[in-house]
Image (cartoon, rainbow, N blue to C red):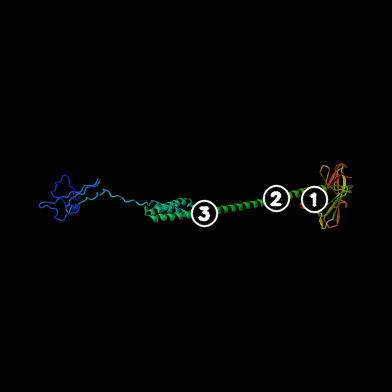
Amino acid sequence: MTAPVPPDSPKSTEEAPADTDPWTPPNPGAGEAPGQGEATVPAPAAAPGEEAAVFAAPPGGHPGAPYWPPYPVPPYPVAAPQPRNGLGIAAMVLGIVGTALSLAVILFWLSWLPALLALVFGFIGLGYARRGVATNRGTALAGVVLGITGLVVSIGAGVFVVARVHTVNEERRAEADAARARADAEQRAADERLAKAKERLEAARKKAEADRQAAAADERARRLAFGQSYTYGDGLKVTMAAPEPYVPSRTVFEPPKDATIVQVKITVVNTGSKEVSLHGSGLPFVHDAKGGLVTTLIDGSDRMKILGGSLAPGQDATGVSAYALPNGAADTFSVEFDYGSGLERKNVIWTGAPS
């Protein structure tokens, strides 16, 4: 095989051996013509797109050996890809925030969102770590754990708050029911007291009405005609006989010339079981037709008798007195007998015309 010769090189007068490898460096001293310096071996033709090797002696190398220059060095170094650790860090921060908020029971409704985001970001960060694009697997795992913890505590706090609110509502409802029951009981008691008060008032009214009617009936019973009787509550029966004309024997004072002198006789009988006193009932009060008080006629005889002292059960007594009526014989007059003490004192009145 012959080495290619550049067109502008001088033709050699000698042919190279057929088995000579032009790419093998010659031995020292071989191929050198006497009296010649270093020779340059022509390089083979380069393939399209390739650079031809320069057959020049490299610095410190053997002459005629093929030499390729080094590849060009880039002007700037290529930066290594940065790890994607942001989601892991965010997961841990949000997990800390969610857990801290969940520990405050009243803020549980705020803690679930950062805890949930921490859980999501943490799983994404773990995926990045498995693919080798993130280097903070521990941080992402901590975010996942804190997110789960925050969610669990938040759910627990929510359940606790709901249960507590339900308990408080039940207690308030029970207190309201108890208060309503107490109010109803008090209302019923008040209604009962009011009903009883009304009953008492009605009973008192009826009693007062009965007393009034009884008093009126008793008042009517004590308004009698001459000759009739009335019995008091303690059993004293009093009766006035019909008035009779009376002729005085001698008098302390002169009666009117047109006067009608009558005798009033009242008989009392103790029909009760206890002794009665006639104190204050000695002389009756006599009124003329106009209501004027008629003075007792005292004649000094022994026919006049005044009631007094007391009566044992079954005893009786009679009082006799005379009165000079200034009116005509046909005019009516009244005789009043009082008996009793204090509020129990009652009068009996007989009314009629003189005989």
Disc 2 designates what residue? 195
Q: Write down the quadrant of residue 100 in the picture.
A: bottom left
- Label 3 Cα neighbours within 10 Å, binned few <14 / some 14-19 / many ≥20: few
| Camera-nearest residue between 215 and 331 | 215
Residues under labels 3 and 2: Cα distance? Answer: 52 Å
- In the image, 350: left or right of 171? right
The C terminus lies in which quarter of the figure?
top right
Residue 216 x %, y %: 79, 47
Residues under labels 3 and 1: Cα distance? Answer: 87 Å
Q: Write down the quadrant of residue 258 in the picture.
A: top right
| Residue type (three-letter) at the residue carrying disc 3 | Val
| In this rendering, the label closer to the viewer, 3 or 2 | 3
| In this rendering, the label closer to the viewer, 3 or 1 | 3
Label 3 vs 1, first from the N-terminus: 3
Disc 3 designates what residue? 159
Q: Which label is found at residue 96?
A: none
Tell me if I can see residue 127 in this picture.
Answer: yes
Residues under labels 2 and 1: Cα distance? Answer: 37 Å
- In the image, 154: left or right of 337? left
Disc 1 designates what residue? 346
Whether the residues at callouts 2 and 1 have beta carbons within 8 Å, the answer is no
Element type where label 1 sits in the image: strand
